[in-house]
Amino acid sequence: MTSVTQEKKTEAPDRSVTEKSIDRTFLWLTRLLAFGVMALLLWLAIQVSLQAIPAIQKFGLSFLFNSAWNPPEQQYGVLPMIYGTLVSSLIGLLIAVPIALSSAIVLSENFLPVSLRKALVFLVELLAAIPSVVYGLWGIYILIPFLRGIGRWLHDNFGWIPLFGTEPLGPGMLPAGVILAIMILPIITAISRDSLASLPPELRGAAYGVGSTRWQTIFSILIPAAFSGIVGGIMLGLGRALGETMAVTMVIGNSNDLSLSLLAPGNTISSLIASQFPEANDIQKSALMYAALILFAITLSVNIIAEWIIRQVKKY
């Protein structure tokens, strides 16, 4: 009898009707908000698609493979802009990911004193608060003159490669990629650091217990365990790079000609829309909305591929 009485005393009391009602209300509210996000995304896609219908009917799939953008003659194609969007974002990722991952490791592990780590975390997060127009001005007056010498050296020594086949004039794909790298760096760093810092300390202790060094623990245990969070941060950074407008517009040169060279001026879909939409006529506006729909599809495809990669890694 005594043991039964003690067990009853340790059991949690039944929850009241009010508490259960609050739980149900919160559950349905979160569901409603989740479906609201999905509905908003679908609504945006439908509205952009409706505005793009005249251009879709007139140009069809040739819009994707045509390099001409000539409003007076109503000739429109976004192949150079698709190339510029993908290449500039890829350059940004190639530069930002190693730096961001290295910074996340340093800021999440005990490589630096706590006070210095806090200061560095604040500075990294401060980069994300800088307006894009400020990045653009910095790119025009500081970055482009700095990269002009590097671009000239690349052209003189590796000009036989199509990627460096043109004489650097200033604005171009390379400055745009570097600007994007700086802009997405705090996003990838912050999310990667949080993913590494949130891992249970037992992982580190177990790795050290079997004789692993610090670097073996980081690269063999911690990074694979935080892989999904790191990839999520990279995808958020890539989404920012694909849709960035003002800073890229100021340093890429806004040329609608297709050139494989990273030293030549180029253009992106978002820069094209921002620079031409205010003065566009009816068919040109529809063509710009068609381009926006393509950018929407590119971003969606990138996120689907990232989710597939995460699931494949989790299998192992």
Image (cartoon, rainbow, N blue to C red):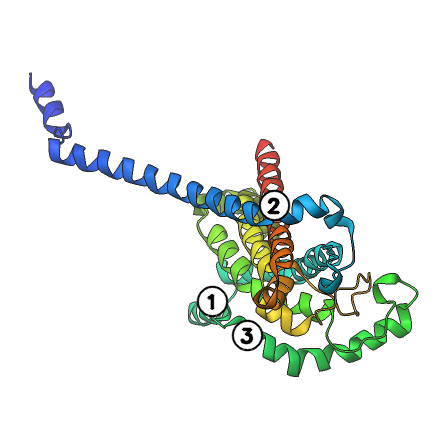
**Side (left or right) of 20 relative to 294:** left
The quarter of the picture where residue 282 lies is bottom right
Screen quadrant of the C terminus: top right
**Upstream in sequence: badge 1 or badge 3:** 1
- Mark 2 is surrounded, within 10 Å at the Cα level, by few (under 14), some (14 to 19) or many (20 or more) other residues, namely some
**Upstream in sequence: badge 2 or badge 1:** 2
Q: Which residue is mark 1?
A: 125
**Upstream in sequence: badge 3 or badge 2:** 2
Task: State the mark number for residue 133.
Answer: 3
In the displayed structure, would residue 80 be above or below residue 3? below
Name the amino acid, label 2.
Ile
Instruction: Give x and y (percent) for residue 42.
Output: 48, 42
Name the amino acid, label 1.
Glu
Query: How many numbered badges does the structure rendering display?
Result: 3
Disc 3 vs disc 2: Cβ atoms closer than 8 Å? no
Say which element carries label 1: helix
Q: Which residue is mark 2?
A: 53
